[in-house]
Structures are given as structure tokens and as C-alpha cells.
């Protein structure tokens, strides 16, 4: 069974999206209306004006202006038969993100408000929400059932939980009954989306922000945040805490609020994001302008500080391997390129200097050649890590290492499904050859003397084949797998 993490909620200042959740675990229809009030209706031009006046942008990663999406769907519908659709991307396939999950679990009616508001303005007959978690599917379905007048217009569909599920064409394909895979074509959903009709496609938080703005109005909405970036943002800090904060708040302050600090650096924007070194992170604020100065974006709102007691090189290598395993399997850069990049990185971290030089070649080989942005995003993640931790990777590639274990500070699904088996060292036989760490760098760490740092190590299910290989390769026959 896959473990589904539940977010811890917090806020900087009075919350808007998370309002009412300090006293209730979930807002049903009655409590939602008590907290937020009735939702006013908007004509299409009024909704476009509202989105423009608050500079509402997509909160799923790309940050595309929402008003332009609305206008594009309206134009496409006018040029055809007028039919439209609204799709809410609630997949959140990245394990470092929980903000959309928090909304759909705890404040689902706010998301439905925004989606139905847009659907009314566009004349769409149906709102479809794509999710990947069973508990989220149940929460949204229950919220739809609580709406006697509009519940039948809402459809929630559970899709496979994969990194690429949230890509626009992948989700639209899956919701339409096809494979949940990127199409590989440069087709905008505003032109041809769900069932071939112009579709307004945006993520969960975007629709929730629209519902808040519709109630507050542009002027009141702009009282929080920055003049050129009004409102609040939802962040997932350390893969566990979802915090709502006005735009422009210093990054160190938010980390402190969540009980952590900058550490060795901060990954901003998730696993397609960028690393900020300690000095940069201390100066950064949570705004587009501030992060752009460091070639970073907030993306899907993931903020991942790296603690001082974990190995940066090992953390990056294990995420790169997971990203390679999340390939859609449709193009060479994903099917062959990303696993080759992950392998070169793992070999370099294990002490192969030649493999370290190969990493750069592998990154160049996948860039701008994929059917979707996954190869580019993964290569950029690795490149950013190499730039942020150059000495760490150089030391590992030269066989010196850092002596620290990989603690899993960058969350992955396998962290929650380690299985019942363990890799056990027989100290009466072990001679410190170190071949086990070459095969299993995610599991085995060597101490200062070159011996395994632990006698018993949990084996993730996905790494069992490699664990068996490590047992076979041990020249001293000092390893075994046990329950």
C-alpha cells in the first residue's frame, strides 16, 4: 500500500485560502459559506478584467497569466460551435508538493467555486477535476454531492499517480479516456482540449485564488502581497508543511516559521526547479522578481531546504534516478537519456571520475529533444545542483566523499514504501571492499574506514534487484537480505 502523506497547515498573517481551517479539519458546504460567504457571478469580460487586475497567474509551475487563458478559450469557442470545458489539475505528481492536496482535502468548495465561476463565464457544461489520490477523490466527490444545484456539473476522475500526469495534454488525454501521457504535440488546450473542445486548464490553487478574488474584489485582494505581485501564495516546505504567505515575504522567515532553516541551500520550484546557495537564499524573497534575479521561479510552490547533516550529492542522485524512472516512455531522451544521466550521476557520486565528465554530456543529449518538458526539467535540476554544490560532487567523483548519509531530505515516494526487507552485513566476513556502495548508493554508506556505516539497512522495494546484485557481487560473501 502506498503511504499518502497529509500536510501540516500554517500561515503568515491572516489566511485567505486556508481560512477557517484553524478550527475545522475540513470545510463542508455550510462551513465554507460561513467562512467565505456567497460567490458573486461574473460575466466573461468581468472575469477577464478581475484576473488582469490582480495579475492572477497559474500556480502549477509555468505561471502563465490566467486572463490570457480565459481570452484564448473565449476566442476559440467563438470561432467554433461555442462549446467549452474546464479542467482542474489536481494531480500534484511531485512528492515535494502538497499544497493542492491540502486545498482539495480541507477546502474543496473553494476550488469548486473558482472552477464553476469560470465555467459559468465560459458557458461550459462540465467541470472535470483530475486527481491521483484516493482520499482527494473522495473529498472532491463529497463536496460535489453537497451542492444540490451544481453537483451534477462536477466530475472527478482519478488518474495514475505519475510525475507526467499533470502535464496538460497528458491529463486531458487521461480524462478523455485515453492514456495519461503527453501527446508530444504543441497543441494548446485552449484550442483543443477535453473531448476536442476549447478547454480552460489550470491547477487547483489558481481556481481557489480566483474564488477568493471574486469575493474580495481586485482592490481588497491587492491589500496583501506586493504592488506588482498581489495576493498570497501557497508553499509546500520540506515536503510536509503547507503554508500560505503574502508574496514578497523573506524566504528565511518562512523556513523559520516551519521549524527549519536554509542549511546547505534551498531547492525552489521542486524537482524541475533551481538550487539557491545559502548566501542567495538569505537574500531571496518569495516573489517572481526576487527569484528571477537568481534564475529561479517558484513554480509549483515547493521549497526544499537541505539540512547540514545529509549528503547533497547523494540526495541529488537519488532524485535524478526517480525522475528517470518517471519517464513517460515515449521518446529517446526520456527512455534512454534520463536513465543514462541518472546512472552517470550515481557512478560519479560513487567515485568514478570519468562518469563525472559524462554527466555533462548526458545533460546536453536530452535537452530540447523531449516530447514534453520532463527531460529539460530533469537536466536543469542536475545542472543547478552541480553549480550549487561543485566541491561536493568533485570530492565524491575523486573518491573522497563527504562521510554523510543520505537522509531523504528530498522526499520521494519510495521513502514511504521501504518494504519489510533489510540488507544485513556480517562483520565477521566483511573486508571493506566497498563494492556494495557502488551498486546501492541509496542504501549503503561507508564510514571513515571504508566499511558500511550500518549493519542493517532497509531496502526500498524498487531497489530490491540492486540489493540482490550487491549480495552477489560481495567478494567476501558478507551481505544477505533478510526480513
Image: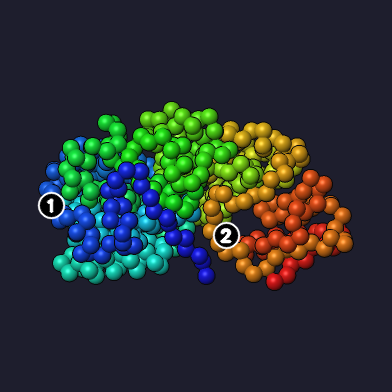
For the view shown, which residue lies furthest in the top direction? 293
Crowding near pointer 2: few (<14 within 10 Å), some, many (20+)?
Answer: some
In terms of secondary structure, where does tag 1 sit? Answer: loop
Task: Give the residue displayed 40% in from the left and 51% down from the top.
Answer: 242
> How far from the left and from the top, in percent, is residue 54?
23, 38
Q: Mark 1 = which residue?
A: 41
Q: Is residue 382 left or right of residue 436?
A: left
> How far from the left and from the top, in percent, is residue 453?
75, 53
CA separation in Å, label 1 and label 2:
45 Å
Q: How many marks?
A: 2
The answer to whether one can see residue 290 in this image is yes
Depth check: 39 or 242 in front?
242
In terms of secondary structure, where does tag 2 sit? Answer: helix
Q: Is residue 248 left or right of residue 52?
A: right
> How far from the left and from the top, in percent, is residue 162?
47, 58
Colour scheme employed for the rendering of this structure? rainbow
Task: Give the residue displayed 15% in from the left and 67% down from the top.
Answer: 149
Task: Give the residue displayed 51% in from the left and 40% down from the top.
Answer: 261
Badge number at residue 215: none
Indicate whether 134 appears above or below 381: below
Crowding near pointer 1: few (<14 within 10 Å), some, many (20+)?
Answer: some
Q: Mark 2 = which residue?
A: 414
The answer to whether one can see residue 79 in this image is no
Q: Earlier in the sequence, mark 1 or mark 2?
A: 1
Q: Is residue 461 left or right of residue 287?
A: right
Q: Is residue 463 left or right of residue 113?
A: right
Quarter holding the C terminus?
Answer: bottom right
Task: Give the residue displayed 53% in from the left and 58% down from the top.
Answer: 413
> How far from the left and from the top, in percent, is residue 464?
67, 64
Amino acid at each position: 500500500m502506498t503511504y499518502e502523506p497529509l500536510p501540516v497547515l500554517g500561515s503568515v498573517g491572516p489566511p485567505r485560502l486556508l481560512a477557517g481551517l484553524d478550527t475545522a479539519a475540513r470545510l463542508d458546504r455550510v462551513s465554507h459559506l460561513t467562512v467565505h460567504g456567497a460567490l458573486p457571478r461574473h460575466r466573461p469580460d468581468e472575469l477577464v478584467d478581475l484576473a488582469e487586475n490582480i495579475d492572477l497567474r497559474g500556480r502549477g509551475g509555468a505561471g502563465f497569466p490566467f486572463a490570457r487563458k480565459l481570452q484564448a478559450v473565449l476566442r476559440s469557442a467563438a470561432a467554433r460551435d461555442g462549446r467549452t470545458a474546464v479542467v482542474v489539475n489536481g494531480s500534484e505528481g511531485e512528492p515535494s508538493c502538497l499544497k493542492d492536496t491540502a486545498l482539495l482535502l480541507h477546502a474543496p468548495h473553494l476550488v469548486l467555486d473558482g472552477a464553476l465561476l469560470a465555467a459559468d463565464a465560459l458557458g461550459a457544461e462540465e467541470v472535470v477535476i483530475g486527481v491521483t489520490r484516493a482520499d482527494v477523490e473522495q473529498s472532491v466527490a463529497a463536496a460535489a454531492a453537497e451542492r444540490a444545484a451544481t453537483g451534477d456539473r462536477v466530475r472527478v476522475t482519478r488518474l495514475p499517480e505519475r510525475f507526467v500526469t499533470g502535464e496538460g495534454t497528458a491529463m486531458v488525454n487521461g480524462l478523455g479516456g485515453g492514456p495519461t501521457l503527453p501527446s508530444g504535440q504543441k497543441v494548446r488546450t485552449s484550442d483543443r482540449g477535453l473531448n476536442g473542445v476549447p478547454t480552460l486548464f489550470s491547477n487547483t490553487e489558481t481556481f481557489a485564488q480566483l474564488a477568493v478574488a471574486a469575493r474580495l474584489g481586485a482592490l481588497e485582494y491587492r491589500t496583501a502581497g506586493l504592488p506588482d505581485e498581489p495576493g498570497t501564495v501557497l508553499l509546500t516546505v520540506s515536503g510536509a508543511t503547507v503554508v500560505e504567505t503574502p508574496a514578497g515575504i523573506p524566504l528565511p522567515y518562512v523556513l523559520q516559521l516551519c521549524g527549519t532553516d536554509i542549511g546547505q541551500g534551498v531547492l525552489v520550484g521542486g524537482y524541475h526547479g533551481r538550487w539557491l546557495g545559502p548566501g542567495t537564499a538569505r537574500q531571496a524573497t518569495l516573489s517572481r522578481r526576487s527569484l528571477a534575479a537568481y534564475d529561479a521561479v517558484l513554480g509549483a510552490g515547493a521549497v526544499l531546504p537541505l539540512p547540514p547533516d545529509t549528503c547533497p550529492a547523494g540526495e541529488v542522485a537519488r532524485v535524478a534516478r526517480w525522475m528517470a524512472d518517471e519517464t513517460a516512455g515515449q521518446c529517446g531522451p526520456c527512455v534512454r537519456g534520463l536513465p543514462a544521466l541518472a546512472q552517470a550521476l550515481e557512478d560519479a557520486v560513487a567515485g568514478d571520475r570519468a562518469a563525472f565528465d559524462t554527466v555533462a554530456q548526458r545533460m546536453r543529449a536530452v535537452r530540447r529533444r523531449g516530447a514534453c518538458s520532463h527531460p529539460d526539467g530533469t537536466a536543469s535540476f542536475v545542472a543547478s545542483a552541480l553549480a550549487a554544490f561543485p566541491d561536493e560532487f568533485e570530492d565524491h567523483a575523486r573518491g573522497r566523499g563527504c562521510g554523510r548519509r543520505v537522509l531523504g531530505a528530498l522526499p520521494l515516494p519510495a521513502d514511504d514504501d521501504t518494504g519489510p526487507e533489510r540488507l544485513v552485513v556480517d562483520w565477521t566476513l566483511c573486508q571493506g571492499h566497498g563494492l556494495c556502495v557502488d551498486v546501492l548508493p541509496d542504501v549503503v554508506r561507508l564510514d571513515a574506514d571504508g566499511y558500511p556505516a550500518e549493519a542493517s539497512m532497509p531496502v526500498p522495494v524498487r531497489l530490491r534487484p540492486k540489493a540482490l546484485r550487491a549480495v552477489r557481487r560481495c567478494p567476501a560473501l558478507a551481505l544477505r537480505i533478510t526480513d
